[in-house]
Image (cartoon, rainbow, N blue to C red):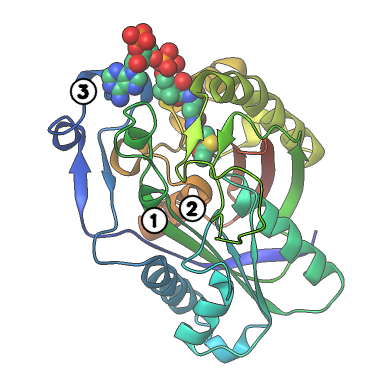
């Protein structure tokens, strides 16, 4: 495989809302949310836009990598919805940081970061690029129905970014999709064409939480095991597991099924909630900034999301 990570960055909006804050206007409680999900608080965009979050995360990753925007050969952004349908969020990032390379978005719901890594891997393999910026960013607070306690409490906003250059540190990568569109849906803008006879759906995120829960519990441990084996490694050789942060119980269930000590699982859901495709690169940046990563460390990643998609991979630091 064909790249290494040379820089990371992340950004989250300033406003933090605790479970108690939400219980002021929703029939919910800190106790319910914490015990069912592990979430204590989440960052929520107020004055910030996704363009702000992606710009900040991108600039931090470039600074960490010591790479200038002009050196980039490709910008990828994973998101379920950027600030605009067009231009892509990646083009907005390009303009905001002053880069000139091709740029486009990748949407694989919460698995988007892993899908973007796979796209980048193809560009490196074809020798089309030397430096790539990936930014994964989500503002699900603006897609959730804030009158629906079963969904809005789960999500938070944020962005995570990585800069890649040629190397051989991606040891394995596995993507799947099964075409499920009923269990987790965010409808698109309908428009007002007078000839359109289809029915307008309500505009908010809708989820069958138990369907997603079952899918995730079944797949996360199996995917991790598979990519660790494909990398030619054993579970014992893994230094950190970066699981998508959707629900602490899903992470615990995966941890229970694999011979990897629980303390190797990185968890920040308590402070960020579910930030969809941004969750893994945000955790990676957190580990990097805190100086917890040593050269050669083995990182196993696993995500699942709407579609249903999954993405898992093993990266050497
Ligand atoms: N506060 C209080 N009560 C609530 C809340 C809330 N915020 N939300 C739901 N409830 C109630 C329900 O109304 C229900 O009440 P009832 O029994 O009177 O009908 C009761 O709690 C139980 O509801 P369930 O939906 O059965 O609760 P469950 O234990 O399944 O937990 C949850 C729900 C947390 C959503 C869980 O199913 C889950 O985490 N699923 C996975 C979700 C996920 O991973 N989503 C994102 C993946 S994709 C992506 O990241 C975009």
Q: Earlier in the sequence, mark 3 or mark 2?
A: 3
Question: Residue 40, relative to residue 173: is it above or below?
Answer: above
Residue 260 spot, x, y in % from top left: 57, 25
- Answer yes or no: do the residues labelled 2 and 1 have beta carbons within 8 Å? yes
Quadrant including the N terminus:
bottom right
Residue 84 spot, x, y in % from top left: 51, 69
Q: Is residue 162 left or right of residue 231?
A: left
Q: Nearer the viewer, mark 3 or mark 2?
A: 3
Quadrant including the C terminus:
bottom right
Label 3 CB less than 8 angstroms from ligand 1: yes
Q: Quadrant of residue 302?
A: top right
Q: Earlier in the sequence, mark 3 or mark 1?
A: 3
Nearer to us in this view, 264 or 129: 129
Q: Is residue 247 left or right of residue 148?
A: right
User: Residue beneath label 2, please?
Assistant: 278
User: Residue beneath label 3, please?
Assistant: 27
Q: Earlier in the sequence, mark 2 or mark 1?
A: 1
């Amino acid at each position: 495989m064909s790249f290494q990570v040379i820089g990371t960055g992340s950004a989250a909006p300033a406003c933090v809302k605790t479970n108690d804050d939400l219980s002021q206007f929703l029939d919910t409680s800190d106790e319910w949310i914490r015990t069912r999900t592990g979430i204590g608080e989440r960052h929520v965009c107020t004055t910030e836009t996704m363009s702000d979050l992606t710009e900040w995360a991108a600039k931090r990753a470039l600074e960490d990598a010591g790479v200038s925007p002009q050196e980039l050969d490709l910008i990828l952004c994973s998101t379920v919805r950027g600030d605009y349908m067009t231009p892509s969020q990646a083009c907005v990032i390009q303009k905001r940081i002053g880069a000139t390379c091709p740029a486009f978005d990748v949407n694989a719901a919460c698995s988007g970061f892993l899908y973007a890594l796979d796209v980048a891997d193809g560009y490196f393999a074809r020798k089309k690029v030397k430096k790539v910026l990936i930014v994964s960013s989500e503002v699900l607070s603006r897609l959730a129905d804030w009158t629906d306690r079963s969904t809005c409490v789960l999500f938070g906003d944020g962005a995570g970014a990585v800069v890649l250059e040629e190397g051989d540190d991606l040891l394995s990568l596995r993507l799947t999709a099964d075409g499920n569109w009923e269990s987790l849906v965010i409808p698109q803008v309908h428009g007002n064409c007078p000839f359109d006879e289809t029915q307008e759906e309500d505009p908010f995120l809708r989820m069958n939480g138990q369907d997603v829960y079952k899918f995730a519990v079944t797949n996360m441990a199996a995917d991790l095991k598979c990519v660790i084996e494909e990398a030619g490694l054993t579970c014992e050789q893994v230094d950190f597991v970066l699981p998508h942060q959707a629900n602490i119980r899903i992470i615990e269930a995966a941890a229970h099924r694999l011979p990897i000590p629980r303390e190797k699982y990185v968890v920040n859901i308590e402070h960020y909630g579910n930030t969809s495709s941004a969750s893994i690169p945000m955790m990676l940046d957190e580990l990097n900034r805190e100086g917890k990563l040593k050269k050669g460390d083995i990182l196993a990643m696993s995500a699942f999301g709407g579609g249903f998609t999954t993405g898992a991979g093993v990266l050497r630091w």
